[in-house]
Image (spheres, rainbow, N blue to C red):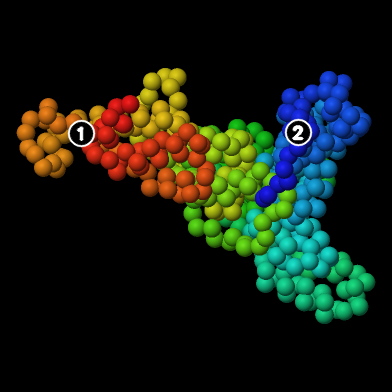
């Protein structure tokens, strides 16, 4: 998404919001720009909503009530046909009782009511709506044709389209590690529960672990279809993911609004690696960790990313306590460390199995110095997409140049 140039006043406003500066402490210049305390509060709420921030952790908690904040946010998201805010499900799903399925049904109805084309729904919103409602391009066109066939009735009563929309979510894949969470249901809803459903709800309340695999899948799916539970897809900083085929991706328009989750998704698809944790990926992309976690969680929901469940904990290298793992974000230090470790590995391996390096001259090993470079094939895509921090880009460019030179220059570069 391309944004308009930021003025000095806007930069100062953003800085004041991040510092949670009250109206009374704002510089006179900003107070003159904003005119009133109410306008300042409006700008604060607008910023937090655009960033999809949680009310109790952002500046908005000091200027508005929690319920008002989330109501305003959902209005903003509906207006822009934006993604459902899964990372805010604890309030949106549990307290407001708004399910992703109902949200997307309402979104599709609004598009139909305004007689907008299917392409007007942004890519990721369309893909998620297809996953939950089963309505894709063909189904959308079919419903619109049925509505228009009623002619005058359609022009007078647009609610005809709502009658043709599904009433329950379609079946979709649920991973065993997804969390099962309860909404705030009413006493009447509780009385209608079967014995199996009551036992399941009691187990969810009492058990610390709430993974889907621990429950009867049929009972859980029945509760989900009635909107009594929602699914949490937890992503932690140490998690690793593998990006799979983008099955179900809908090629519509890109979003014309600010959405940190959508903007990070494209970067995740390009630079993600099974060898990098979410925290390391956030460092590589210079992105906010919580926003990247939300993006990775969404990719898992749609089956575009596969979480590696403790795939190789026994293969983890031991490190000095207090020393962070080497990542692409560690710049030159990490790169030179990998070179030194490669040299040590090569030396020890050669001492056990003989000299594995083919050279033109034979002689004592003491007369030969070996240099090993580890090349990551993914680095090409990193550089082309501009997703790597400037420090590591400079290092890679320098390495590429030195490798084209003689062995002596390469060795000098490695020893620097």
Q: Position of residue 58 (x, y in %)?
A: 74, 30
Residue 196 visible to the viewer: no
Residue behind mark 1: 370
Q: Residue at x 43, y 22 (%)?
A: 323
Residue most extreme to the left: 363
The earlier-in-sequence mark between 1 and 2 is 2
How busy is the neighbourhood of tag 1: few (under 14 within 10 Å), some, or many (20 plus)? few
Identify whether 79 is placed above or below 392.
below
Q: Examine the image and state in which quarter residue 234 appears.
A: top right
Residue behind mark 2: 8
Q: Residue at x 77, y 49 (%)?
A: 77
Per the image, label 1 sits on a secondary structure element best described as loop
Q: Position of residue 20 (x, y in %)?
A: 77, 25
**Quick check: 127 left or right of 159?**
left
How busy is the neighbourhood of tag 2: few (under 14 within 10 Å), some, or many (20 plus)? few
Q: How far apart are marks 1 and 2 (CA)?
A: 54 Å
């Amino acid at each position: 998404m391309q944004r308009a140039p930021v003025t000095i006043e806007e930069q100062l406003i953003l800085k004041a919001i991040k510092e949670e500066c009250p109206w009374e402490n704002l510089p006179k210049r900003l107070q003159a720009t904003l005119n009133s305390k109410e306008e300042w509060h409006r700008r604060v709420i607008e910023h937090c909503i655009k960033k999809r921030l949680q009310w109790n952790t952002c500046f908005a908690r000091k200027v508005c009530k929690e319920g008002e904040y989330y109501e305003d946010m959902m209005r903003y998201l509906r207006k822009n046909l934006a993604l459902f805010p899964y990372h805010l499900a604890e309030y949106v799903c549990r307290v407001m009782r708004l399910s992703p399925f109902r949200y997307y049904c309402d979104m599709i109805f609004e598009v139909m009511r305004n007689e907008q084309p299917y392409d007007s729904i942004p890519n990721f919103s369309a893909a998620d709506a297809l996953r939950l409602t089963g309505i894709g391009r063909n189904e959308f066109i079919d419903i619109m044709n049925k509505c228009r066939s009623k002619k005058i009735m359609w022009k007078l009563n647009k609610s005809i389209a709502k009658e043709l929309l599904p009433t329950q979510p379609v079946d979709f894949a649920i991973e065993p590690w997804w969390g099962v969470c309860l909404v705030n249901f009413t006493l009447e809803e509780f009385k209608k529960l079967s014995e199996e459903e009551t036992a399941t709800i009691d187990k969810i309340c009492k058990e610390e672990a709430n993974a889907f695999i621990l429950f009867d899948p049929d009972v859980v799916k029945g509760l989900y279809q009635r909107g009594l539970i929602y699914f949490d897809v937890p992503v932690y900083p140490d998690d690793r993911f593998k990006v799979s085929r983008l099955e179900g991706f809908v090629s519509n328009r890109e979003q014309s609004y600010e959405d940190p989750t959508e903007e990070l998704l494209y970067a995740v698809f390009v630079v993600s690696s099974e060898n990098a944790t979410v925290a390391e990926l956030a460092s590589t992309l210079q992105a906010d960790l919580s926003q990247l976690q939300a993006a990775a969680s969404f990719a898992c929901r749609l089956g575009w990313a596969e979480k590696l469940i403790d795939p190789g904990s026994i293969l983890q290298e031991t490190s000095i306590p207090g020393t962070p793992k080497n990542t692409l974000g560690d710049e030159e230090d990490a790169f030179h460390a990998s070179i030194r470790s490669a040299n040590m590995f090569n030396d020890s391996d050669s001492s056990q199995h003989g000299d594995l390096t083919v050279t033109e001259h034979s002689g004592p090993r003491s007369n030969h110095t070996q240099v090993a470079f580890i090349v990551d094939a993914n680095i090409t895509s990193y550089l082309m997409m501009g997703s790597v921090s400037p420090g590591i880009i400079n290092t890679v460019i320098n390495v590429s140049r030195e490798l084209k030179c003689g062995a002596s220059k390469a060795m000098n570069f490695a020893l620097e």
